[in-house]
Image (tube, rainbow, N blue to C red):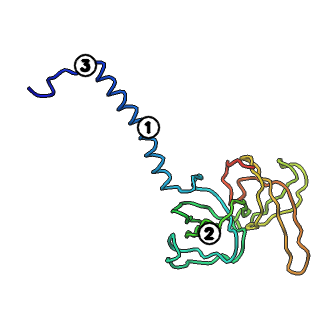
Amino acid sequence: MSLRNVPAPAGRLAAVLTRLLLVMLLLVPLGLERAMAQDNPSGLPLPRFATTRSTPINVRVGPGTRYDISWVYVKAGVPVEIIQEFDTWRRIRDVDGSEGWVHQNLLSGDRAAYVAPWNRELQVPLLPSRNDAGAPRAVLGSGFRVDVSECDGQWCEVSATHRPENGRASTYHGFVHQDQLWGVYRTEVFD
């Protein structure tokens, strides 16, 4: 007589199957969470924008100091896009599309952007409010860097600082169409 042919009490079998199902339901999310954490150690969304924190910053070909240096950032506050994470290293993409790895401590969650770097001829008005009415406070040329304080999905509130070589810096505050910036996503909302 084989064990297959021995009938199990219905109540006992149901209890065993219920426990097995509960154990499986508890273990599956833990496995998924661990797998996701390995792909994204910070737990923050990918991709996302950040800025360089200090200078100089060595951008490397791989995630670690044993990898060669591709290029060096010599200014803080440069907007970059974080596209991948590995342990404490972040793979970034810059406005030109170049990619490399930097340590997480060299990046900041502060937001900055470049005005329409894809069109060298474009002049973008810095407006006093979230609409196209009113005289511009300034006109920003393609590639001009701005600090971004918030975006609502259509407009971003920014600060633009002009630093002439022989003079005092001037800062202008206002609003720019969100789709005219590299450093924020087209419909991203944050404050």
Label 3 Cα neighbours within 10 Å, binned few <14 / some 14-19 / many ≥20: few
User: Which residue extends farthest bottom?
Assistant: 166
Which is more toward the observer, 45 or 139? 45
- From the viewer's perspective, is the residue at label 2 or at label 1 nearer? 1
Q: CA distance from mark 2 to mark 1?
A: 45 Å
The residue shown at (50%, 76%) is 67
Q: CA distance from mark 3 to mark 1?
A: 26 Å
Q: Which residue is mark 2?
A: 96
> Mark 3–mark 1 contact, CB under 8 Å?
no
The residue shown at (80%, 57%) is 158
Q: Which residue is mark 1?
A: 26
Q: Earlier in the sequence, mark 2 or mark 1?
A: 1
- Image quadrant of residue 52? bottom right
115 left or right, relative to 125: left
**Amino acid at the residue labelled 2:** Asp
Q: Which residue is mark 3?
A: 9
Q: x, y percentage for residue 30?
A: 45, 44
User: Which residue extends farthest left?
Assistant: 1
Label 2 element class: loop
